[in-house]
Image (cartoon, rainbow, N blue to C red):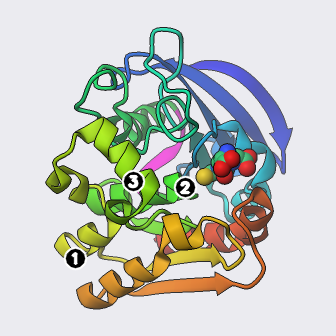
Amino acid sequence: MQLISNARAFGGEQRVYRHRSSSTGTDMDVAVFLPEEALRGELCPTLFYLSGLTCTWENVTVKGGAQRPAADHGMIFIAPDTSPRGEGVADDEAYDLGQGAGFYVNATQEPWAAHFRMEDYVARELPKLLAESLPVDADAIGVTGHSMGGHGALTLAMRHPDVFRSLSAFAPITNPLDCPWGHKALGAYLGEDRAKWAEHDACELARSRGFRGDILIDQGQADGFLEEQLKPWAFDAACREAGIDLTLRLLGGYDHSYYFISTFMEDHVAWHAQRLFG
Ligand SMILES: N[C@@H](CCC(=O)N[C@@H](CS)C(=O)NCC(=O)O)C(=O)O
């Protein structure tokens, strides 16, 4: 891993690394906040934050406000990119497909299949690479995310319970089988067989695989994507059916932006800290 930047923050360090990814076949950038404990070499619980459409590692790193609570709890905070990037990588003019919109799946369809392998990257390659290179406690990794990244957090945690032990999300896409973003992206990456989409639908996964812990979701009630794209009530119903303990907080007046995320980031870091510190 090549260190691209490093800045002191809250007694720790905010770093950005670049590394060659065997999953995507591209260089990937990833932001890593290390608290003071990690700088001393102590193994630390670690929270992955998966970002939404159009984002890179940078949005949450500069606007999410995660560093102070991560430092307070002695947690490492990881912000991966949302897709492979670069000239040789397929793309689409729309903001909700291609670069910046990897949807945390392994694409099987052309022209995406060569590089768009974000599930392997986030759930397999990155936890291993980080645990080998930094004081990441591989037995204490949690995952959260926003919007498309909330979908990534919910689905990857349920598909990879050996990797992710605690789970929360901000305004997640909960039912891609039943929303325009989901139809477009999963159709493009996985093809038209809806049975393949169901393997990456949080509602379906709640019923088929479940999650052994409890789950926190925060959702702003003034979020413009709420009714058409996010549908947290669908996930609420699925969790009730599956007997999963979901805390769904509907927050009056909050929208889809990083003002919303930064307001509640502290609660999410604390949620994961309570579950990861054994
Ligand atoms: N650009 C899109 C919306 C994209 C969007 O809202 N992206 C969210 C994630 S789904 C985000 O985090 N944007 C980056 C930011 O706010 O820094 C639109 O115009 O409708």
Q: Is residue 136 magenta?
A: yes
Seen as rendered, the residue at the extreme top is 88
Residue linked to disc 1: 207
Mark 3 and mark 2 residues within 8 Å of each other at the beta carbon: no
Q: Is residue 21 above or below residue 211?
A: above
Which residue is nearer to you in this view: 94 or 123?
94
Q: Residue drawn 36% across and 77% down?
A: 213
Could you say which quadrant of the image residue 194 lies in?
bottom left
Q: Say whether residue 68 is left or right of residue 269.
A: right
Callout 1 amino acid:
Arg
Residue linked to disc 2: 47
The disc label shown at residue 182, or none: 3
Callout 3 amino acid:
Gly
Q: Which is more N-terminal, label 1 or label 3?
A: 3
Could you tell me residue 117's position as x and y percent? 34, 32
Which residue is nearer to you in this view: 57 or 213?
57
Q: Predominant secondary structure in magenta?
A: strand
Callout 2 amino acid:
Leu
- Over which residues does the magenta segment extend? 134-141
